[in-house]
Image (spheres, rainbow, N blue to C red):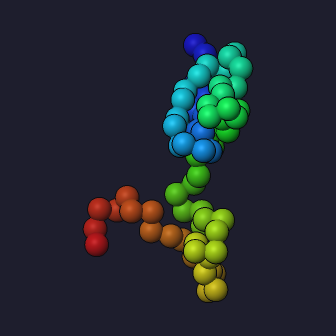
Amino acid sequence: MTELTQYECQKCGSIKETSDDTPVPVCCGRPMLKDEPVDVCEPGFGAEDSRMDNLGDPCDDGRSGKI
């Protein structure tokens, strides 16, 4: 069974899944970028996601179901 890879267009945001043996798809005149999953508990990479007091404590990833 072939693995599927998900690609996302950086210009329009469209998403396309292809098998590993096909070339990188093109959208809006540019090659699409591979869409890598981000771990739920990892902080983001932008200024909006950073915290001054990030002590590396466990995070609440929203799967507990309790408020």
Q: Residue 54 in the image: x percent, y percent?
A: 62, 80
Residue drawn 45% across and 63% down?
61
Q: Nearer the viewer, residue 66 or 51?
A: 51
Q: Residue furthest top?
A: 1
Q: Residue furthest bottom?
A: 53
Q: Residue furthest front?
A: 29
Instruction: Count numbered badges in the picture.
Output: 0
- The answer to whether residue 48 is seen in the rendering is yes
- Quick check: 67 left or right of 36? left
In the rendered image, which quarter is residue 23 located in? top right
Residue drawn 54% across and 29% down?
16
Q: Is residue 15 above or below residue 3?
A: below
Q: Is residue 34 above or below residue 62?
A: above
Q: Residue 42 in the image: x percent, y percent?
A: 60, 62
Quadrant location of the C terminus? bottom left
- The answer to whether residue 56 is seen in the rendering is no
In the rendered image, which quarter is residue 10 located in? top right
Quadrant location of the N terminus? top right
- Quick check: 62 left or right of 24? left
Residue drawn 62% across and 31% down?
27
Q: Nearer the viewer, residue 26 or 34?
A: 26
Q: Is residue 23 above or below residue 15?
A: above
Q: Is residue 52 above or below residue 56?
A: below
Q: Residue 60 in the image: x percent, y percent?
A: 45, 68
Q: Residue 48 in the image: x percent, y percent?
A: 58, 74
Residue drawn 67% across and 32% down?
29
